[in-house]
Image (tube, rainbow, N blue to C red):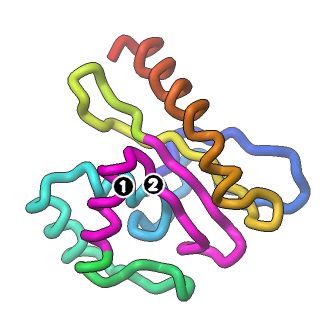
Amino acid sequence: MLYLERVECDWPLRMQLQAGSRVPIHATASGKLLIAQMSERNRKALLGSIQRQKFTGNTLVGLDEMEAECRKIRANDLSINKEEYHLGLIGVAVPVRRSDGTVIAALSIHAPSFRMSVETALSYVPLLKASSAKIVSELGL
């Protein structure tokens, strides 16, 4: 998973990843969201070709559990990372869709779990979706 752009907070304790950073696609909210949008054939090919490392006890690595997570992501139109890449780090991601419905990117927030709960992160979903729509509009997509 490649981060194209990042806006960092100025809190002293944070997960600092610069634009251009790469993280494992199967263990982040944004990555799982993008995987969920793939056709079943492409999703299975991707998941079969990458090393699905278990970073924490919460990391999903089994193909069946990944497929179940993808169904949930598509149904809810959002993805949640519950400390799957790093213990103590949560995140929520929403799709960035072109006017034809094709997902071209993800927009997400993440924070240390002691500072933001999953429930609080979910409360930002309407703002994330509005921001996603604004990005698409401004890019003329």
Marks 2 and 1: CB-CB under 8 Å?
Answer: yes
The quadrant of the rendering that contains the C terminus is: top left
Q: Which residue is mark 2?
A: 79
Residue beneath the point at 30% across and 57% down: 35
The quadrant of the rendering that contains the N terminus is: bottom left
- Residue sitting at the far right: 12
Q: Which residue is mark 1?
A: 73
- Residue sitting at the far left: 41
Q: Position of residue 25 (x, y in %)?
A: 40, 64
Chain part drawn in magenta: 66-94
Residue beneath the point at 53% across and 25% down: 130
Residue beneath the point at 52% across and 81% down: 58
Q: Secondary structure at mark 1?
A: helix
Instruction: Assess disc 1: are there few (<14), some (14-19) or many (≥20) residues with their C-alpha within 10 Å of its C-alpha.
Output: many
Quarter of the image for residue 53 reads bottom left
Instruction: Assess disc 2: are there few (<14), some (14-19) or many (≥20) residues with their C-alpha within 10 Å of its C-alpha.
Output: many
Between the residue at mark 2 and the residue at mark 1, the CA separation in whole angstroms equals: 5 Å
Is residue 87 on the magenta stretch?
yes
Is residue 70 on the magenta stretch?
yes
Q: Position of residue 69 (x, y in %)?
A: 34, 67
Q: Is residue 68 above or below residue 1?
A: below
Residue flagged by tag 2: what amino acid is it?
Answer: Ser
Q: Is residue 132 above or below residue 72?
A: above
Q: Is residue 5 left or right of residue 76?
A: right
Q: Position of residue 2 (x, y in %)?
A: 46, 52
Q: Is residue 29 left or right of residue 15?
A: left
Q: Position of residue 96 (x, y in %)?
A: 40, 33
Residue flagged by tag 1: what amino acid is it?
Answer: Ile
